[in-house]
Image: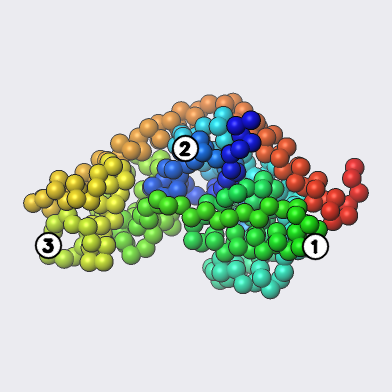
Amino acid sequence: MENEQKKVMLSGIQPSGALHLGNYLGPLRHWPRMIEEFDCYFFLADMHTITVRQDPAALRKQTITLLATYIACGLDPEKCTLFIQSHVHQHAELAWVLSCYSMFGELSRMTQFKDKSARHSENVNAGLFTYPVLMAADILLYQPDFVPVGDDQKQHVELCRNVAERFNGIYGDVLKVPEPYIAKVGARIKSLNSPEGKMSKSQPEGCVFLLDTPEDIARKFKRAVTDSDTENCVRFDPEAKPGVSNLMQIYAAATGKTYEEIEAEFQGQGYGVFKPKVGEAVIETLRPIREETQRLLKDKSYLEGVYRAGAERASAVAERTLRKVYKKVGFIQR
Ligand code: TRP
């Protein structure tokens, strides 16, 4: 009963790399609260990752690790639908239909396609081009009200809306047109060693991974770039002091303290005192997640149970949408 009134939310993440502090302090940290408020679908978009070459063993490992990490971060599989994209065959099937309602021109305009095909010029495959169509299928199968995405995915959600509207324009109200959901609270964490750019796994020394050991985390914070002003004082000023301000943002998120409180705490003390303190706070924030992830990874049969049950639930919902679409386009019902 209760579920019927809840709005539906859906989000996917590619298991192509380890989660880092930027992911956690941005969207991930808020998800445990969202599963109370919304009927949530979270999936690991393994089918999307093969648009660029993956090592098969590494992909399997990343996928299961990410599943365990999600659960450790508080995504209780009893309270949301957690699944692996390739386990729900309806994604590929709806993607085919939708590809016949997606235009070559609009797909050519996707900035991520342009970027990725420039970066992987030796492998500009058709999947890279139709990636947003698969993403549209991911979304539309579950008829969500909201799709929380970062800036880089907004254009894809926009495309999904356009394709759904085009389809509905021909066949009536078949597909629910979702809204992109821009999170109200989302820290934008910068790289520790080049605070002009986002924290990213492509720069591992400036990036704190959720499963990093305490020693790694401590080292990365000790080496974090602070600003070359002569002030040597902990003060929030993202323009003049991007490095220190980034560390303050991390410290604030990890401890719940305000910038004023942090400035007071470190008054008269320099970066040499501040940086290791931020490291310690992060170590303590991530410790339970790392430990729980490691515990879950040893319990293979539990994780199998989670993804099987998740796929079963997802598939039942996805099948309803796919049937409707097949019928509308004129396929004979089996
Ligand atoms: N393309 C998204 C990314 O790279 C991942 C993704 C795949 C996704 N399907 C989705 C996100 C559906 C939201 C909804 O981040």
Q: Under 8 Å from ligand 1: the CB of mark 1? A: no
Seen in the image, is 168 located left or right of residue 124? right
Tag 3: residue type?
Answer: Glu
The answer to which of marks 3 and 2 sits earlier in the sequence is 2
Q: In the rendered view of the protein, which quadrant contains the C terminus?
A: top right
Q: In the rendered view of the protein, which quadrant contains the N terminus?
A: top right
Tag 1: residue type?
Answer: Ile
Helix, strand or loop at disc 3? loop
Q: Where is residue 254 in the image (x, y as percent from the top left)?
A: 30, 43
Q: Residue at 79% of width from left, 51% of height from top?
A: 325
- Report if residue 69 is visible in the image: no
Residue 259, labelled with which disc? none
* Colour option used: rainbow
Of badges 3 and 2, the one in the foreground is: 2
Q: Do the residues labelled 1 and 2 touch (CB within 8 Å)?
A: no
Q: Residue at 13% of width from left, 58% of height from top?
A: 232
Residue 32, labelled with which disc? 2
Q: Nearer the viewer, residue 168 or 231?
A: 168
Q: Are marks 3 and 1 in contact (CB under 8 Å)?
A: no
